[in-house]
Image: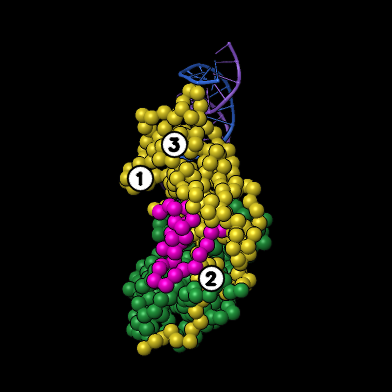
Chain colours: A yellow, B green, C blue, D purple
Amino acid sequence: MNYYHEKTKFYVAVDCIIFGFSEGRLNLLLLKRNFEPSKGQWSLMGGFVRDGESVDEAAKRVLQEMTGLGNVFMEQVSAFGEVERDPGERVISVAYYALININAYDRELVQSHNAFWIDINELPELIFDHQEMLERARNLIKQKASSQPIGFNLLPKLFTLTQLQTLYEAIYGEAFDKRNFRKRIAEMKFIEMTDKIDKAGSKRGARLYKMNKAAYRKDRKFKL
Amino acid sequence: MNYYHEKTKFYVAVDCIIFGFSEGRLNLLLLKRNFEPSKGQWSLMGGFVRDGESVDEAAKRVLQEMTGLGNVFMEQVSAFGEVERDPGERVISVAYYALININAYDRELVQSHNAFWIDINELPELIFDHQEMLERARNLIKQKASSQPIGFNLLPKLFTLTQLQTLYEAIYGEAFDKRNFRKRIAEMKFIEMTDKIDKAGSKRGARLYKMNKAAYRKDRKFKL
DNA sequence: TCAAAAGTGTTAAGTTTACACCCATGA
DNA sequence: TCATGGGTGTAAACTTAACACTTTTGA
């Protein structure tokens, strides 16, 4: 009754491409590996899928172990299955990207893993096919961020329009016109003005906005 | 020196969502399973990844075994890793979609596997999570076909503009204006008019066009 | 001769882009 | 008082959408 006998089994891993946004720049949380294999080199955060755990769950677990964060926006990029992608052993890896609010993670936990936030434009060389995973993730985000409001996962709950614009400029790698940008935001009724003012970014202070997810589910018009 | 010991290994499979286009309709090549597990039910075409073979290669092999076709346009959809997705055993599956010219496959081979072309709007229930794989693939194609000329893989080398329009209408599930459609095609210089006429589709005959891939690589402006 | 599919331009509506100055505040 | 980032509207350029008739030919 076992139709699966004599098929080969494989190690299956997950690798997490963790994006954060800080001071107008996109950052990645990367590991300076203080363990084998490839000790001393930079890599994404990864781990093996365990018995009784779905692949999605494995990715969430790895992220949780590294950052202390649960309930994070995370999506699969793709499976990577080249035979020699990991020179040590045959490992099939499923890549995920995560968008996190860079103020919310557990600093000690991250430090204890020897992980660092690296500006996405100043990346070191990465092991295996992690570079390729990262590029795929960046392209995915670029596409996806233009038609769905996923960028907000990178911001605090309350944000200024300048922060939002800078974020999108970082994602796309190009500058936008301030007035045109604000016109588009004004059309999206689920990006709601609050009565709070942020005084950190300027003397005058800037209006804080918030994303109303329930309102988005009703309207669903998003384009940036 | 083995950093991978005591990790769990998994069966890894591929499943292929094979699209064809015929008489104005999108079709899927589905298996009426005459083997266990789930004998008698409908499924996508799948197979296990083998030792020494990349996951992409496994997908190509499965397609080749089923249709006799090599060198087919094929892309990964996603990995599917729920614990109970296959009720028999834990199997992690990577889904791929393929776009094939419905005139070119090996009919006997397909018949011998008990496979059938089914209109995409009249699909039977599928086993496991194959329905979800299919929906993901359809969405992917919709998106991708709008910005890259992948649709041509579903057509013969020479095609009429009416065929091309009908194809895109089938992909998007909506009708287009004929004049506006042709205006857009005319702007894409890599869709080249030939001196041949198709007399099969109408009495008057329709001009045949072809896709010039080299010209596309230079220009790369595509939007439908 | 007529049914059936092929082929062909123009105009209005809507969307996108470019662009410059005043405001409020803390140092 | 002045340097800094916050905030605001309009007009031109471009893109998209709507729309109907003539042509060709085999049955």
> Residue A195 is drawn in which quadrant?
top left
The correct choice, above or below, for A156 with respect to B164 in the image is above
Foreground: A52 or A106? A106
N-term mark: 2 or 3: 2
Identify the mark at residue A159; answer none if there is no mark.
3
Foreground: A133 or B161? A133
Where residue A46 appears, as percent x and y from the top left, is: 52, 62
Q: Which residue is mark 1?
A: A213
User: Position of A62 compared to B220: left or right?
Assistant: left
Given the image, on which type of amino acid does mark 3 rest? Answer: Phe
Q: Quadrant of the N terminus of chain A?
A: bottom left
Q: Do the residues at pointers 2 and 1 share their chain?
A: yes
Magenta residues, start to end? A44-70
Tell me which residue sits at (41%, 28%) in the image. A197
Q: Secondary structure at mark 1?
A: helix
Q: Which residue is mark 2?
A: A92
Other residues around mark 3 within 10 Å, as few (<14) / some (14–19) / many (≥20) = many
Tell me which residue sits at (36%, 73%) in the image. B84
> Residue B215 is drawn in which quadrant?
bottom right
Foreground: A156 or A182? A156
Other residues around mark 2 within 10 Å, as few (<14) / some (14–19) / many (≥20) = many
> In whole angstroms, how far apart are the C-alphas of marks 3 and 1?
15 Å
Can see residue B145?
no
Q: Can residue B32 be found in the magenta stretch? A: no
